[in-house]
Image: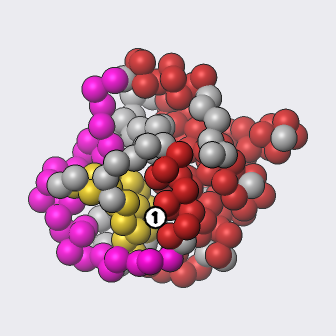
Amino acid sequence: MRFRPFIGALALSLAFPALGIAQAQDSAAKQKLIALGTVSTDHRALINEIKQDLHVAEPVILLIGPFEDKIWMGELFKEAGTAYVAIDQNFYRSLTDKEQEAMIGHEMGHFIYTYIYPYLDDRIKFQLQAGADLFAAQYVGADAVLSWLGKTFPTDDDKELAEYKWRKKVLGDFKQAF
Ligand SMILES: [Zn+2]
């Protein structure tokens, strides 16, 4: 059990108790993703550890695209009693083993830091993403998450974005604290 809950997650779950994962997608869209993806057995130990820590009852499947640009780089969604960590194939292959784990940890962090569609405002979006980053950092370390984050925001322009700067700062603070 490496996961320690953060106050932010509790506050958010109290504020938005009824919101589930991937609200923007209807069942047909999720079925399409499932049909397009390939089930992978990679990183099973990590997935099982997180699943156990979070008391996630449903199966968690790692699903690797291509998803025909229907998702950005990855996301967590639930369909028919199963949870899916869906990751774009090309992006997944561009990552090191540690970065793949960071990404899986981040996506599974969204079991707690649940997506809210549409994002109410940027502060909430940043908070959710940074929360999922910190969650992942507890399993794979802040450096692996920072390295993955750098690839998630690939260009210099991307790295000027407030979201990137905020998430990097939060991870930097985490690194110092532990
Ligand atoms: Zn995320």
Q: Is residue 126 above or below residue 40?
A: above
Residue drawn at 59 percent across, 69 percent down: 100
Q: Is residue 175 left or right of residue 53?
A: right
Residue drawn at 33 percent across, 80 percent down: 38
Tell me residue 9's x, y (percent): 53, 28
Quarter of image, res 140: bottom right
Tag 1: amino acid: Met
Whether 23 is among the magenta residues is yes
Q: Is residue 102 above or below residue 17?
A: below
Tell me residue 84's x, y (percent): 34, 60
Q: Is residue 122 left or right of residue 135?
A: left
Residue drawn at 74 percent across, 55 percent down: 141
Whether 26 is among the magenta residues is yes
Q: Is residue 61 left or right of residue 81?
A: right
Does residue 80 appear in this view? yes
Residue extent of the magenta highlight? 17-42
* Residue placed most toward the observer, 2 or 116: 2
Does residue 164 appear in this view? no
Q: Is residue 78 above or below residue 114?
A: below
Tell me residue 85's x, y (percent): 40, 61
Q: Residue furthest right?
A: 176
Per the image, the residue denoted by label 1 is: 73
